[in-house]
Image (cartoon, grey):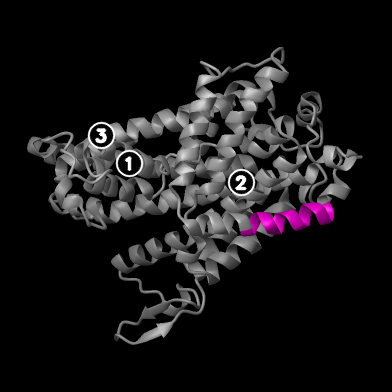
């Protein structure tokens, strides 16, 4: 019975907060601007350029603007819950740490192990996409890279003479993961500065597209604003707007990585909520205006089945150089996404190691750089291997079922701590509790149920592997159980 109880033993809040104040820890260098940039860096990727056309052409029409707002509100429920818990427990680990305080060690392990998969596979998948866009961008400049060296062994590629060969290794994917991992090892301040530069580039590209596109809008493309339903649920009408919101929802996910940097924030109780909510607000405004311009330039019916609606919109302008600029923006977007994902996964691993659930070497802090450098090295090798040798179709989407599962746990955690520790100081309080956390759970659960069977199978297989590690190692080395 005692062993069973230990599985659900919660880590005291006082212990968690004291760990964040210990001397030999990560270096606190991030201010609110850096944290907002981290959030934007994780949220805005190529999804902005691809999902908008899909959502408008197949589901919502010009009313995709409303879908972006609805999806943002759904994400905001989870974002406000993350903000409250981050101010109460300002340490590394994000959802893993919050689960440890509210639902016990076993659930914390499940979430932590799952986040490792989500961040690692997400970074690997994005590295493959980054490679493809870099190869295409270099080709536009007249630089051709050997096809076998930019494709994995499981992919067939065509040479310039039309000959079909099998790839050997995706070197650009390995290269970018190695560079970003080494940057993270050198220091969080340096990584944050690089991320800020990248974020400025990709936001500037989006703003340039918006500024140019405004002059090529045709008002008739907004009529009808909400196209009538075709008779199929999810194709136009209000059901289409809601279906589009579900598609777009995934374009917002990534803000949670801000909370993994809580132990490196100068004033986490003040700045983490600013980072999370601020990045969501900035991205929502950019998304809505971008969608407004795109649907004004290209009729929603023309977007149906169009794999590159942004390219179609650019063709309507006398500025072909915009194509190269958009590619540059996408490359910048992918780069910052990878950087923030690699940061998040190493901090989750660091927190799990600090608690004894993983070997101590992964929570060792470099004396000079003040970073968990061994975790960075581990993930550099792990993610590079997947990025270099596994096709993107097998890696899956960057964000999927595990991240949504973490959102549900965090929303539930707010409810638990409001009941168990109503007296605990909170510099930020999620409004309208219990309504906001409950709505967050409902929205995220609905998104989980919309995912494919393969995604669920992948999750269960990974959790089965994690269970073997937990019951074979972690239970016996847990500091809380001692």
Q: Earlier in the sequence, mark 3 or mark 1?
A: 3
Q: Is residue 89 above or below residue 378?
A: above
SS state under label 3:
helix
- Please identify the quarter of the rendering in which residue 424 is found: top right
Main secondary structure type of the part rendered in magenta: helix
| Residue positioned 54% across, 72% down in the render | 389
- Please identify the quarter of the rendering in which residue 260 is found: top right
Q: Nearer the viewer, mark 1 or mark 2?
A: 1
Q: Are marks 3 and 1 in contact (CB under 8 Å)?
A: no
CA separation in Å, label 3 and label 1: 9 Å
Q: Is residue 7 visible?
A: yes
Q: Which residues are magenta?
A: 461-473
Mark identifier at residue 238: 3
Q: Is residue 297 left or right of residue 408?
A: left
Instruction: Give how far across and how far down residue 119 sits, in percent.
Output: 58, 50
Q: Is residue 304 left or right of residue 431?
A: left
Question: In the rendered view of the protein, which quadrant contains the C terminus?
Answer: top right
Task: Determine if the magenta segment contains residue 457.
Answer: no
Q: Earlier in the sequence, mark 1 or mark 2?
A: 1
Instruction: Give how far across and how far down residue 69 sits, in percent.
Output: 34, 30
Crowding around mark 1 (Cα neighbors within 10 Å: few <14, some 14 to 19, many 20+) is many
**Residue occupied by mark 2:** 343
**Residue occupied by mark 1:** 243
Q: Nearer the viewer, residue 457 or 389?
A: 457
Q: Nearer the viewer, mark 2 or mark 3?
A: 3
């Amino acid at each position: 019975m005692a062993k069973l109880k230990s599985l659900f033993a919660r880590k005291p809040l006082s212990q968690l907060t004291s760990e964040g104040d210990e001397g030999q820890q990560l270096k606190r260098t991030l201010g609110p601007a850096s944290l907002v940039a981290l959030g934007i860096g994780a949220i805005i990727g190529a999804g902005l350029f691809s999902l908008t056309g899909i959502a408008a052409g197949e589901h919502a029409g010009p009313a995709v603007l409303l879908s972006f707002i609805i999806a943002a509100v759904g994400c905001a429920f989870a974002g406000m819950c993350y903000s409250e818990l981050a101010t109460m427990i300002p340490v590394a680990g994000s959802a893993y740490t919050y689960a440890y305080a509210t639902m016990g060690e076993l659930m914390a392990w499940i979430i932590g192990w799952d986040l490792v998969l989500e961040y690692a596979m997400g970074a690997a998948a994005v590295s493959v996409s980054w490679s493809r866009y870099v190869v295409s961008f270099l080709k536009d400049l007249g630089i051709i890279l050997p096809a076998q060296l930019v494709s994995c062994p499981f992919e067939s590629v065509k040479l310039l003479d039309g000959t079909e060969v099998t790839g050997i290794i995706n070197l650009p994917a390995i290269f970018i993961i190695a560079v970003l991992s080494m940057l993270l090892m050198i220091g969080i301040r340096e990584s944050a500065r690089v991320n800020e530069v990248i974020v400025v580039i990709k936001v500037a590209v989006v703003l340039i597209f918006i500024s140019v596109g405004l002059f090529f809008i045709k008002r008739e493309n907004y009529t009808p604003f909400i196209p009538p339903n075709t008779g199929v649920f999810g194709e136009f009408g209000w059901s289409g707007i809601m279906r589009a919101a579900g598609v777009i929802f995934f374009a917002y996910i990534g803000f949670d990585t801000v909370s993994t940097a809580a132990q490196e924030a100068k004033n986490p109780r003040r700045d983490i909520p600013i980072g999370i909510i601020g990045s969501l607000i900035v991205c929502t405004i950019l998304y809505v205006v971008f969608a407004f311009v795109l649907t004004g330039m290209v009729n929603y019916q023309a977007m149906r089945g169009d794999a590159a609606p942004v390219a179609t919109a650019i063709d309507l302008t006398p500025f072909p150089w915009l194509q190269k600029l958009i590619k540059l923006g996408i490359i910048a977007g992918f780069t910052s996404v990878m950087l923030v994902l690699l940061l998040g996964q190493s901090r989750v691993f660091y927190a799990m190691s600090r608690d004894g659930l993983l070997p101590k070497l992964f929570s060792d802090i470099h004396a000079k750089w003040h970073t968990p450098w061994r975790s960075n090295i581990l993930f550099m090798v792990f993610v590079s291997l997947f990025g270099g040798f596994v096709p993107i179709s097998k890696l899956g989407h960057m964000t999927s079922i595990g991240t949504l599962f973490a959102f549900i746990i965090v929303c539930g955690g707010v409810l638990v701590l409001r009941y168990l520790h109503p007296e605990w100081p909170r510099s930020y309080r999620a409004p309208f509790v219990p309504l906001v956390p409950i709505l967050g759970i409902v929205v995220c659960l609905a998104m989980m149920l919309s995912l494919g069977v393969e995604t669920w199978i992948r999750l269960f297989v990974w959790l089965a592997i994690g269970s073997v590690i937990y019951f074979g190692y972690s239970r016996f080395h847990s500091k809380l159980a001692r």
